[in-house]
Image (spheres, rainbow, N blue to C red):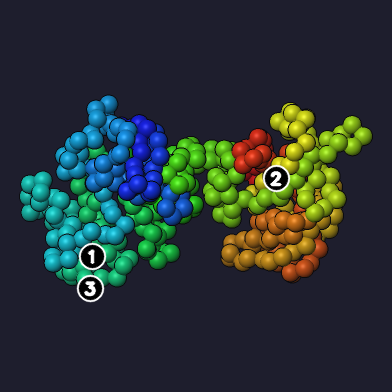
């Protein structure tokens, strides 16, 4: 197990890469470190690998501090985003290098190199040098060199970020299968929400060097702790409407800004509001609402179609509601036209509510999940 305790890393006097970071990477888990550019993701990996030393705090491996242990003595394998390949030797020798350093026989090395090359679809590149490869090809070689040898933990920095869509999907499955079959411990950095949710046993969401939330894919998707996590996790991202509670004839409602709508508040949600009449942000995922061309008992919220995104297997419809936009998933055969009037199944039992950026209410379950 790897543990970071209150780790802070500064570069110079003004750049704070990570701040008071505390997290655990459990044995045999695939931990995804997810966040926007500049969040401190790569710095966190480099701190674990020993390439960078923390300014303050401690890093432990199996309950022993490794801050002063050299990178080569940590039994960790890392694939850097900038590839870090040996440009003067063949791809074969780049892959074989970690195995030769461990004293494996030529036969064992050859078997391992061809196994990894086949998995990464770089068999035909083994006799080339890195300078003659594309960016995606170099990335696959760098990934292969990292995972070819046994290690206590694999640190993968955007390992498939530069691949084409088809190969990226395949490699996502290969990485997950390898982690499960070999019971490997991995920490993987990504800026893709889909990769984070698909790969991670747990996800660490970073922003500006600070952890916003740690949880399983289910937890960070269904119960985001704040509006940033809610908007950043999931595709399409969560939609938001500014809203405020109103009292009328003894009943509590939510009114989205720019509308005359009155969304009845359930007793469960009323307890979360606790009588507070300040403004809230109502959040709803595309999978939590449905769209109809006609008003009926379920579809009571009017809106105007703004844009339709065709994804092949489904369509994403963005609908203007008051001063905001709500996205909804519909079947691929449902194609409303821009400016068409539609009705949404928006109700308070299937929305998330945020106050001052922090979550105060989540639906007990998703409408379609």
The percent coordinates of residue 289 (x first, y second) are 71, 50
Choose between 252 and 105: the one closer to the eye.
252
Give the distance between the C-alpha atoms of the residues marked 2 and 1, in whole angstroms: 51 Å
Q: Measured from the top left, where is residue 327 in percent x and y?
A: 67, 56
- Residue lying farthest bottom? 132
Q: Residue furthest right?
A: 249
Question: Badge 2 is on which residue?
Answer: 282
- Name the side, left or right, on which 165 lies relative to 9: right
Q: Are marks 2 and 1 in contact (CB under 8 Å)?
A: no
Residue under numbered circle 1:
123
**233 or 164, nearer to the observer:** 233
User: In the shown orientation, is residue 51 left or right of residue 99?
Assistant: right
In which quarter of the view is residue 307 placed?
bottom right
Q: Earlier in the sequence, mark 2 or mark 1?
A: 1
Image quarter of residue 180: top left
Please tell me the numbered disc located at residue 161: none
User: Residue sitting at 61 percent across and 38 percent down?
Assistant: 358
- Element assignment for label 1: helix
Give the camera-side residue of 357 and 286.
357
Judge depth for marks 1 and 3 and give the one in front. 3
- Location of mark 3 (residue): 132
């Amino acid at each position: 197990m790897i543990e970071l305790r209150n780790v802070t890393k500064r570069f110079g006097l003004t750049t704070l890469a990570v701040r008071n970071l505390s997290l655990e990477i459990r044995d045999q888990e695939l931990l995804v470190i997810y966040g926007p550019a500049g969040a401190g993701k790569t710095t966190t990996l480099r701190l674990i690998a020993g390439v960078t030393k923390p300014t303050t705090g401690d890093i432990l491996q199996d309950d022993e501090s490794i801050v002063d242990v050299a990178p080569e003595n940590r039994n960790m394998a890392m694939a850097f985003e900038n590839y870090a390949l040996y440009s003067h030797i063949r791809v074969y020798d780049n892959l074989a290098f970690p195995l030769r350093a461990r004293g494996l026989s030529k036969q064992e090395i050859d078997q391992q190199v061809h196994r990894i090359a086949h998995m990464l679809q770089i068999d035909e590149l083994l006799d080339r040098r890195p300078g003659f490869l594309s960016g995606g090809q170099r990335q696959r070689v760098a990934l292969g060199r990292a995972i070819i040898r046994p290690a206590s933990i694999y640190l993968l920095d955007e390992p498939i970020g530069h691949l084409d869509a088809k190969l990226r999907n395949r490699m996502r499955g290969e990485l997950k299968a390898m982690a499960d079959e070999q019971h490997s411990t991995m920490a993987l950095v990504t800026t893709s929400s889909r990769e984070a949710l698909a790969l991670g046993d747990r996800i660490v969401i970073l922003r500006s060097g600070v952890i916003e939330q740690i949880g399983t894919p289910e937890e960070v998707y269904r119960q985001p702790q704040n509006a940033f996590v809610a908007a950043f996790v999931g595709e399409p991202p969560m939609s938001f409407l500014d809203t405020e509670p109103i009292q009328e004839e003894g009943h509590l409602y939510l009114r989205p800004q720019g509308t005359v709508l009155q969304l009845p508040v359930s007793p469960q949600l009323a307890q979360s509001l606790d009588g507070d009449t300040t403004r809230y942000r109502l959040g709803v995922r595309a999978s939590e609402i449905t769209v109809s061309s006609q008003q009926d008992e379920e579809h009571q919220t009017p809106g105007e179609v703004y844009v339709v995104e065709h994804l092949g297997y489904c369509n994403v419809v963005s609908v203007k509601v008051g001063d905001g936009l709500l996205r909804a998933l519909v079947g691929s055969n449902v194609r409303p036209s821009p400016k068409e009037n539609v009705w949404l199944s928006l109700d308070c039992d299937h929305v998330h509510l945020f106050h001052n950026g922090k979550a105060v209410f989540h639906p007990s379950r998703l409408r379609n999940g």
